[in-house]
Image (cartoon, grey):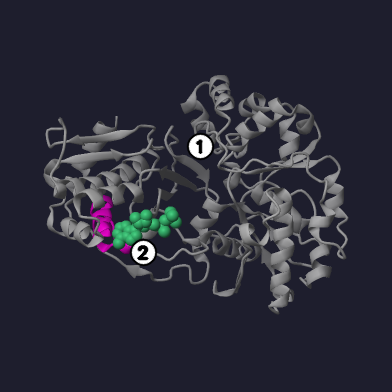
Amino acid sequence: VVAVDGNLSVVHQDNVQFDSELPEFGNSMMISQALDLILGKMKNAGFDFSRVKALSGSGQQHGSVYWRKGTNQVLRDLQPGKSLHELLKGGFAVSDSPVWMDSSTTEQCQYLETAVGGAQRVADITGSRAYERFTGNQIAKIYKAQPEKYEDTERISLVSSFAASLFLGSYAAIDYSDGSGMNLMDIFSKQWADSCLEATAPHLEERLGAPVHSSAVLGLLSPYHVTRYGFPEDCKVVAFTGDNPGSLAGMRLQEGDIAVSLGTSDTVFLWIKEPRPTVEGHIFCNPVDRPSYMALICYKNGSLTRERIRNKCAGGSWEVFSSVLRTTPIGNYGNIGIYFDAMEITPSAVGVHRFDKENTKVAGFSAQGEIRALVEGQFLAKRVHAEKLGYKIRTRVLATGGASSNKDILQVLSDVFDAPVYTIDVANSACLGCGYRALQGDLINGIDWLSLPHYHKDEMVFPSPKSNVCTVADLCSNTLAALD
Ligand code: ADP
């Protein structure tokens, strides 16, 4: 939990660790009890609930919760003397709710793509081709494997709208941004797509409820929390969203920005106006600006691959790795490498592939050439995929994650994107972003996100590109050909 004031300054934060504080669970009940716990901790810390004007939140994307028939009434009648956990016992039709790691729905994905007209068609409608973890495919599996549980389900929530329901005291709507991670919503009309609903399960629309925009005020906080914790009666509940959209808000992305997280896996977030969905990467509705979109691209081969090449070519030292980047030329004499140690997500391919300046496949590079080929190749792929999804205007690159502490890696990032790189500290970005969104929903609903006070905080400026634009563009087309 993060509380921000009207100037976006953080005034309170705390957390509940599921593994250590709630080891006995593994399901939706855990989230209800976690909410009891965190609010109790805030109360003990003397947090002044009476000053809360609005709240919002984020939850792990794609996960889903199945409310048993009759539970909406239970939510409406919550008695303040009891914990949410006690009150909601027995309220769920499916106890082992699917989470994002589930990848057991390949059959359902194939069925959806065939029924709707192919992978690209599913992407054109929903922003992504069919993915195993996406909620629609999870629902289809539950319907097929446990039809009686689907029948007993009154409402299906995402983790985000589930948590919102606990505050609202009735089923909360799914927001457009998190709803984009389901393979069920038309991201352009922002309605459930009939063709996808039909391929998933019967009578699904009534179980999902109508989606709403991400800064919609869903209603006032349930009297349960007002009595129990002392929130004001007019405290607003703003739609909750997914953790990735929440992070986009927390990182204060703007149009033209690209955020690159360089962790175990690499992730790219983009803010775009005119998306072009492809079968690689995901397009979601933007959580802070209604007409805009965000794109998300995940790469499995990130830091672990950089570590392997560091060990092989730089004696295991980041220092040596960095000095090679400093002393080798941009463009690597036309040598390009693609290093997929593990089966890559974007694109679905594996293996190491090296090309010289004639675009001829070669067996190896020098140790120095290999290091530069790896880092340039990883960043060129990110730029190529981002541009395929509609990324045009380049303003800033925001870098986070473990490898963002390496200036020489960031210099390559800057050269490839031909834009200045900023490093940002994004601890709790999803949670912080939802504090910002609560303020947006409360104060300036419908007004430009960028007019929020102190939105443009100066971050640490990092390297500017040294390269010449033509060289980088040439490199990109070369990589595109290689990737194809
Ligand atoms: P996670 O995705 O697990 O949260 P982090 O964002 O913490 O990962 O990043 C961890 C990675 O950062 C490590 O795998 C390591 O390879 C990488 N890393 C740490 N320091 C450096 C450095 N100086 N240069 C390049 N990479 C680094």
Relative to residue 102, is residue 266 drawn left or right?
left
Q: Please give the name of the residue rendered at 21% of the width and 57% of the height, measured from the top-left corner.
A: 321
- The part of the chain drawn in magenta is 404-421
Task: Name the image quarter holding the C terminus.
Answer: top left
- Name which residue type carries label 1: Gly
User: Does the stretch in magenta take in 479?
Assistant: no
Q: Which mark is residue 141?
A: none
Decide: few, some or many residues near mark 1? Use Cα within 10 Å; few <14, some 14-19, many ≥20: many
Q: Amino acid at mark 2?
A: Thr
Magenta residues, dominant SS class: helix
Residue at screen point 35% across, 51% down: 303
- On screen, residue 21 above or below 8: above
The quadrant of the image that shows the N terminus is: bottom right
Is the residue under label 1 in contact with that under label 2 (CB below 8 Å)? no
Identify the secondary structure beneath mark 2.
strand
Image check: 20 left or right of 385? right
Magenta-colored stretch includes residue 409: yes
Mark 2 / mark 1, whichever is N-terminal: 1
Label 2 vs label 1: CA separation? Answer: 29 Å
- The label on residue 127 is 1
Q: Helix or strand or loop: what does disc 1 sit on?
A: loop
Q: Position of residue 61 (x, y in %)?
A: 58, 46
On screen, residue 40 versus residue 8, left or right, reads right
Give the residue pinned by disc 2.
423
Q: Position of residue 298 (x, y in %)?
A: 42, 44
Q: Is residue 416 visible?
A: yes
